[in-house]
Amino acid sequence: MLRTKQARIFTALMLTSILSVSGGLIFSQNANALSVGLLADSTQEIVKQNLKSAALPRVVANAVLRDISNREGIAINKLKITDSSRQTWSNGCLELPKPDEFCTQALVPGWLVVVSRGRQKWVYHTNDNGSVFRFKENNNNSSLRPVPIPANELPPPLDRNTVFREISTGGFAGRTYETVLLNDGRLIRVRIGDANDSERSVRRVTVAQVRQFQRVLNREQNVFRNVSYPAPGGAADFITYKLTSRKGTVQYNDISRSNLPNNVQTVVQAWSQLVSAAK
């Protein structure tokens, strides 16, 4: 009888031990599974955060800075990217269509980039790698309105062999330079008042480049209405540019350049690119 009770007690103890071990294994497996699940969710969240806060690709930054440098004639080391963010543009024009331009209706991943130099600011829309970009005209400066250039301040008309002329004056040095483009592709720059003509330079572009530039002038001929886009009140040490085609003259300054109307921007950019290409 005593042996039977002892056997029952031993059996009960063994069953209790087995159940405890099994329960521990089940709890351990559930805990491990929960840990793996949490780790997977955390990793995905970190990846999402990295994508959201990813830095602007160097190739995009370089494309934007080079364009501003060419457009404005400002050294790249004087420019600073002050803001950038990932965007998905709703069309092939990066949501900045030109007048009467047809835009493909396709989503384009890219970037919104803001560049500054003192009070100047430029806003760009780009695609993902910077191979396509658009400059956004800043319309916030409501005071930038064209005013007629007084007749006594207008430069003389172009002669028969001259396609275009730029007269720049002001800046720290206060000097005046004249650059003319001739039909044969010569680009001649002189300093007004240089008695020895020591600063004269003669470079060339191809005739094809001259013709391409003339097409821009013909397309944007309404720009040359003998008007000026003045500098903001209180501005100092800025450079004033007078651009003259066969249709007339337009005047602007380097401080207000980023706020010029799109058609004026188009002419200024085309001229800057032509000058940069001259050899």
Image (cartoon, rainbow, N blue to C red):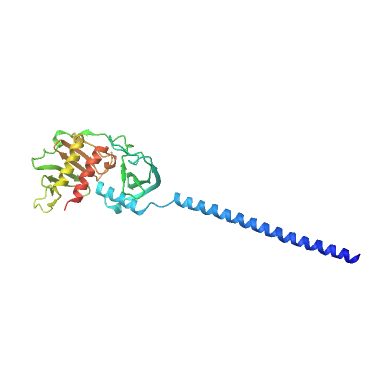
Residue 245, by quadrant, is top left
- Residue visible at 29% across and 52% down? 76
Q: How many marks?
A: 0
**Residue 227, how many percent across, how many down?**
20, 35
Residue 204 falls left or right of residue 7: left
Q: Residue furthest right?
A: 1
Q: Is residue 11 visible?
A: yes
Of 1 and 53, which appears nearest the observer? Answer: 1
Q: Is residue 239 visible?
A: no
Residue 226 falls left or right of residue 127: left
Residue 162 falls left or right of residue 266: left
Residue 249, by quadrant, is top left
- Residue visible at 13% across and 45% down? 181
Of 150 and 50, which appears nearest the observer? Answer: 50
Residue 20 falls left or right of residue 133: right
Of 1 and 85, which appears nearest the observer? Answer: 1
Of 96 and 27, which appears nearest the observer? Answer: 27
**Residue 149, how many percent across, how many down?**
18, 34
- Residue visible at 56% across and 55% down? 39
**Residue 189, how many percent across, how many down?**
14, 49
**Residue 101, how many percent across, how many down?**
28, 36
